[in-house]
Amino acid sequence: VIIAVNKTDDKRARGRFVEFFQLGFEPITEIAAEHGEGVGDLLDEVIRLFPSVRNKGRTLDDPEETAVAIVGRPNVGKSSLLNRLLKEERSIVSEIPGTTRDAVDAVLKWHKRTFRIVDTAGIRRPGRVARGGQIESISVVLSKRAIDQADVAVLLIDSTEGVTDQDAAIAGEAEKAGCGIVIVANKWDLMKGQGTNFSKDFDDRLRQQLKFLDFAPILHISALTGERAPKVLETIDKVAEARMRRVPTAELNRFIQTVTAAHPPASPGKREVRIMYATQKSVAPPTFLLFTNVATEFHFSYQRYLVNQLRETFNLIGTPVRLHVRRRART
């Protein structure tokens, strides 16, 4: 049973959304049928409950596949990484090559998992696209489309150059799209002899430059030599599972009671702000709805606290987590 609560474009109706949990059914989705809002989420829930696709991610073509986009600036080694993964994993289902400017799809099996990996053409700055002509412009569209359709994006960075503004821009596209993210520092074989603390210092600088991706795991590999390359698929799999994780409502509300008791939200007015109820609205990425006793917006630091606690408690590695706060309707 899936409950679809209609007409939630009306603010008064949205405030009563929490009352439907008293019926004892989950999942519950919000829709506004007249305007088409939330219908996509409803269809995702319907598909998710089919036995053949239960607990699987949203993918490019096949719901039983995990769609992976290898993204990054030109010449950071995206095609080399794809080729390395195909050489490492012998059970290749198919390989669909395009030109060097197009996205390239490869489907492979790994430990009973199926991955459709898209090696995108490098995402370039708008100025470069304009100078590069129409083909480069199309490649940018294909790259961003692959991110939008991916379950997990592998952000490939040239470790000899470090993080650039363009890396940050690409990372922002992936986070905004809500796909899981794995950061891979390539060409690590060229960083030998840098000292015992170099790896930690590199990661610290990367975290500082990509603060909004503090949840993404970092791998150091060499696509050329194969060093640590097998860890890529293993990490992608963990992130894809976390992105589809659903927390039972009772467990989620026990969690909310614990974390708010340890650190209650600030109360800007005379009334104490309390989180009355919480539910997970959707997956891919995990999205949580918090109902409060008064209309309020949590400070970004408190939202970050809740998100960090959610990640730690429910092992939400590598996936964006969304929080929405709403005042519970008066009865």
Image (cartoon, rainbow, N blue to C red):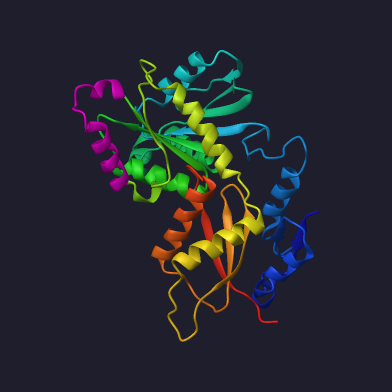
Horizontal and vertical percent position of residue 100: 45, 23
Q: In the image, what residue occupies the spot 60% across and 15% down?
A: 91
Q: Quadrant of residue 59?
A: top right
Q: Residue furthest bottom?
A: 270
Residue 329's place in the image compared with 21, above or below, is below
Q: Which residues are magenta?
A: 188-209
Residue 100, can we see it? no
Give the quadrant of the C terminus: bottom right
Horizontal and vertical percent position of residue 142: 51, 36
Residue 83's place in the image compared with 53, above or below, is above
Horizontal and vertical percent position of residue 209: 29, 46
Residue 178, can we see it? yes
Q: Quadrant of residue 155?
A: top left
Q: Nearer the viewer, residue 245 or 309?
A: 309
Q: Nearer the viewer, residue 22 or 239?
A: 22
Q: In the image, what residue occupies the spot 51% across and 17% down?
A: 86
Horizontal and vertical percent position of residue 78: 41, 26
Q: In the image, what residue occupies the spot 77% across and 41% down?
A: 50
Is most of the magenta stretch helix, strand or loop? helix
